[in-house]
């Protein structure tokens, strides 16, 4: 019998997580991967979680699907739990520090091709193992959570097809169009998902704050609605209205002296153009326009040259 670990949520409540050895199981030969196929042909849906080992809400939602697979009206459903090793090392005392083993797995997706080197990190090796199960998805839903409290955000890259997919799912209420990170390619940005001319679509859902009740709930809703919308013929509950925020600028940290002027809440809206947000060495970072959204400002222990400090966005469409 697999052992489950129990963690303490931000609210103080206890939550039992899926067992690490269960998450490393499979019904198709690759650890952490399950595939379910309906009798009738249809789209291929891939659901991924644990690209970051401490973002457990997605694993919780996917584990429920693995435990009691839905009856699919059509198509194929693939479930992938990504960073098995980081998750296996997670316990209640260290849960915030189990994001990765060697490097951020959501920056490696442009480095999988060519001959695998012996020097490859755990995350690159694991990404190579996973990719064959993901590459022919028609739609990809990638589940994450965030450092600071915020409503669930659907990151949809730059392609219109991903906004259309998010509208089919009808969740979350806030969609963010962004170009990713200077530090490396995310899974949702890799071809074919990041290619506006190719049909396959992807959305990364930041479900809420790490280890919050809200994140667990949002992950459940995202998974349930995606399966129902694409692989089921039953009516989907009405969608929430969805607004789109377009990121116009990712502020990449240039110097070790980068410092925010204050602790900005995630998704804060700064009313005035020209408001000072941060200093980076002798440079100032200011809001480019009125009502600038501050998308996922980095916490102080993620301030390192080359990383993204914050993304700046504006509301381009509201439902
Ligand atoms: Zn993440």
Image (cartoon, rainbow, N blue to C red):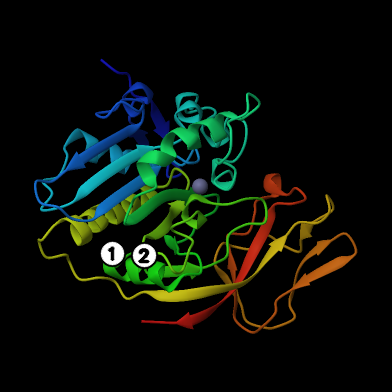
Q: Earlier in the sequence, mark 2 or mark 1?
A: 1
Q: Nearer the viewer, residue 19 or 127?
A: 127
138 left or right, relative to 37 = right
132 left or right, relative to 245 = left
Circle 1 SS class: helix
Label 1 neighbour load within 10 Å: few <14, some 14-19, many 20+: many
Residue 169's tag is: 1
Vertical order, 221 against 84 (above or below): below
User: Measuring 20% from the left and 40% from the top, which residue is drawn there?
Assistant: 36
Q: Residue 283: x, y in percent?
A: 86, 67
Q: Quadrant of the N terminus?
A: top left
> How far apart are the two marked residues, 2 and 1, measured between alpha carbons?
16 Å
Q: Nearer the viewer, residue 2 or 70?
A: 70
* The furthest residue to the right: 282
Q: Which residue is mark 2?
A: 199
User: Measuring 28% from the left and 64% from the top, which residue is drawn there?
Assistant: 169
């Amino acid at each position: 019998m697999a052992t489950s670990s129990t963690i303490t949520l931000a609210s103080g409540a206890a939550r039992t997580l899926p067992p690490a050895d269960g998450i490393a199981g499979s019904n198709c030969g690759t650890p952490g991967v399950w595939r379910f196929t309906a009798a009738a042909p249809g789209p291929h849906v891939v659901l991924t979680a644990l690209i970051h080992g401490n973002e457990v809400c997605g694993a919780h939602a996917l584990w429920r699907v693995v435990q009691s697979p839905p009856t699919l009206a059509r198509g194929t459903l693939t479930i992938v739990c990504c960073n098995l090793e980081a998750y296996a090392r997670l316990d209640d005392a260290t849960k915030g520090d189990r994001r990765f083993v060697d490097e951020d797995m959501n920056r490696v997706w442009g480095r999988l091709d060519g001959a695998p080197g012996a020097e490859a990190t755990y995350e690159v090796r694991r990404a190579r193992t996973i990719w064959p199960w993901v590459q022919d998805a028609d739609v990809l839903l990638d589940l994450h959570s965030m450092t600071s409290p915020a409503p669930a955000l659907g990151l949809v890259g730059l392609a219109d097809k991903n906004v259309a997919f998010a509208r089919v799912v009808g969740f979350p209420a806030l969609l963010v169009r962004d170009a990713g990170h200077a530090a490396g390619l995310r899974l949702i940005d890799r071809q074919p998902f990041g290619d506006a001319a190719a049909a396959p679509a992807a959305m990364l859902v930041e479900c809420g704050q790490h280890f919050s009740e809200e994140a667990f709930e949002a992950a459940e809703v995202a998974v349930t609605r995606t399966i129902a919308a694409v692989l089921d013929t039953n009516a989907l509950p009405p969608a929430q209205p969805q607004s789109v925020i377009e990121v116009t600028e990712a502020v990449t940290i240039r110097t070790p002296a980068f410092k925010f002027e204050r602790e900005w809440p995630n998704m804060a809206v700064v009313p005035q153009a020209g408001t000072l947000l941060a200093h980076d060495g002798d440079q100032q970072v200011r809001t480019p326009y009125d009502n600038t959204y501050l998308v996922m400002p980095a916490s102080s222990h993620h301030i390192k040259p080359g990383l993204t400090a914050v993304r700046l966005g504006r509301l381009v469409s509201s439902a």
